[in-house]
Image: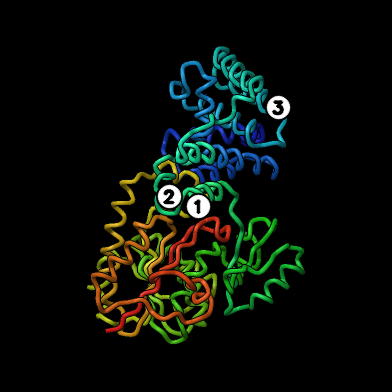
């Protein structure tokens, strides 16, 4: 029986695995990264095939509305009328034909037809064959018509919901909105943060060079390193021994903006999974106290796991609703507060392509209300002269500068601090107001918003 199971595992192809994941994501509204990781663990794919399956899943989800737009021209009754697995088979096959030069078209079509034969009946495999060969014969039809309105053209060319593109055009202009969408379809960079309580960035770069790993210092984060083709950094001894953490460069800028120093008392209101918490502890040389709060007990354990791996003893984890922290601690009892607020996540689409298809304008309105309540509630815990940082991984002005402007307007004791030089001073140079908006194309990192607010009285 075990031998049979092993054999059946080896028979799964990259395309079959991708098809299963895409269908589960569509039918069960499941997260693609969780489904894909689970499927890859169960399968016995070579490294190359695992890479292809990953590319097919994320690429197909990323280009979803463009693929459907063109498939509707070739499927007589329309793509929506098909069974989910057939629809996803056509999508991942067209993705290969349109976006993957390294795969011969006939190979993509033959594999799709074989999959359709195994999964369905003769009629389905015949239809799949007919549609894909028709696409190959009429490749010139895989082009958008001239004269489309800007938002519709960008939405189809770079595969984003049109409402999202319209929103970004209003906020940033047509050219920047298109650059956001283009950047969201690029593969994310691999970056790590050096635990400077254990080793310097220069020391870690030297270690990597010795090990044959191609790496370079981050141009924007003093503790960051960009890694090129080094494999999964979470499987390295450096990670296991607590010398590095995996973190996006934009996210690394948050702890620096907080400006924690040894001996301070810091509150991290929504701390899980603990990357920014640990970074602040490292900047404090693990001297002082960080109260790291999260709503969920299982997430509190993630923060504790990070602290233990990194050898940090200054992190004290608590569980609870961040809106009730003001009932739990005396007013003015923290030198620094980080509110890394719940948000729409629209800055991390390149890492989580599902996000663009699951969010709605209403979600943004709802989350903004919560963000404003959180800022209002936790601000009373900041001592006079202290600094509070509000950050999100979104690029929507309503969740970002408008939320901070609303807070400053309704809390006269708080204001924009003078720039203190260093990384934050360079980042904030020329910016209006308390915050800095990083767009995905700015540094080829995640879209992020970071604002510093000081309590004056």
For the C terminus, which image quadrant?
Answer: bottom left
Q: Secondary structure at mark 3?
A: helix
- At horizontal 56% and vertical 16% (from top left) the residue drawn is 127
- At horizontal 34% and vertical 85% (from top left) the residue drawn is 385
- At horizontal 55% and vertical 59% (from top left) the residue drawn is 442
Query: Where does label 3 land, which residue?
Result: 107
Q: Which of marks 3 and 1 precedes in the sequence? A: 3
* Left or right: 124, with 52 as reference point: left
For the N terminus, which image quadrant?
Answer: top right
For the view shown, which residue lies furthest in the bottom direction?
263
Q: Is residue 292 visible?
A: no
Question: Which percent across, then down, holds residue 181?
Answer: 51, 47
- Residue 427 to residue 344: above or below: below
- Residue 239 to residue 99: above or below: below
Q: Is residue 214 visible?
A: yes
Query: Where does label 2 land, which residue?
Result: 168
- At horizontal 69% and vertical 58% (from top left) the residue drawn is 228
Q: Secondary structure at mark 1?
A: helix
Q: Which of the 4 image quadrants contains residue 264?
A: bottom left
Q: Which of marks 2 and 3 precedes in the sequence? A: 3
Question: Dot 2, how many residues are within 10 Å of its Cα: few (below 14), some (14-19), or many (20+)?
Answer: many
Q: Nearer the viewer, mark 1 or mark 3?
A: 1
- Residue 166 to residue 144: above or below: below
* Left or right: 236, with 348 as reference point: right
CB under 8 Å between callouts 3 and 2?
Answer: no
């Amino acid at each position: 029986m075990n031998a049979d199971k092993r054999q059946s595992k080896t028979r799964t192809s990259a395309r079959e695995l991708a098809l299963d994941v895409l269908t589960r994501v569509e039918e069960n509204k499941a997260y693609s990264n969780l489904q894909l990781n689970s499927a890859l663990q169960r399968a016995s794919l070579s490294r190359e095939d695992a890479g292809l399956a990953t590319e097919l899943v994320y690429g197909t989800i990323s280009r979803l509305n463009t693929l459907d737009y063109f498939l509707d021209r070739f499927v007589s009754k329309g793509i929506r009328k098909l069974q989910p697995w057939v629809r996803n088979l056509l999508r991942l096959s067209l993705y290969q034909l349109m976006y993957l030069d390294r795969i011969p078209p006939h190979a993509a079509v033959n594999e799709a037809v074989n999959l359709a034969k195994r999964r369905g009946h003769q009629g389905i495999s015949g239809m799949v064959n007919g549609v894909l060969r028709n696409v190959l014969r009429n490749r010139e039809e895989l082009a958008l018509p001239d004269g489309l309105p800007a938002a519709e053209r960008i939405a189809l060319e770079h595969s984003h919901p049109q409402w999202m593109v319209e929103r970004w055009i209003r906020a940033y202009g047509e050219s920047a909105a298109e650059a956001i969408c283009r950047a969201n379809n690029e593969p994310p960079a691999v970056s790590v943060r050096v635990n400077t309580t254990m080793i310097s960035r220069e020391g870690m770069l030297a270690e990597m060079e010795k090990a044959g790993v191609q790496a370079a210092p981050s141009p924007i984060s003093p503790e960051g390193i960009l890694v090129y083709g080094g494999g999964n950094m979470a499987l390295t001894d450096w990670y296991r021994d607590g010398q590095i953490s995996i973190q996006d460069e934009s996210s690394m800028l948050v702890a620096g903006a907080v400006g924690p120093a040894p001996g301070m008392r810091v509150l991290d209101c929504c701390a899980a999974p603990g990357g920014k918490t640990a970074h602040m502890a490292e900047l404090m040389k693990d001297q002082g106290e960080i109260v790291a709060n999260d709503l969920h007990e299982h997430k509190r354990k993630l923060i504790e796991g990070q602290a233990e791996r990194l050898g940090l003893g200054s992190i004290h984890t608590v569980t609870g609703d961040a809106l009730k922290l003001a009932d739990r601690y005396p007013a003015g009892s923290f030198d620094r507060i980080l509110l890394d607020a719940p948000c729409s996540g629209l800055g991390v689409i390149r890492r989580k392509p599902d996000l663009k298809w699951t969010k709605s304008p209403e979600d943004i309105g709802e989350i903004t209300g919560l963000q404003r309540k959180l800022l209002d509630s936790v601000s009373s815990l900041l001592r006079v002269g202290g600094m509070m940082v509000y950050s999100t991984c979104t690029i929507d002005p309503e969740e970002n500068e408008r939320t901070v402007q609303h807070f400053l307007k309704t809390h006269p004791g708080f204001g924009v601090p003078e720039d203190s030089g260093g990384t934050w001073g360079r980042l904030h140079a020329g910016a209006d107001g308390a915050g800095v908006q990083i767009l995905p194309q700015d540094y080829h990192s995640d879209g992020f918003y970071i604002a510093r607010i000081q309590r004056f009285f």
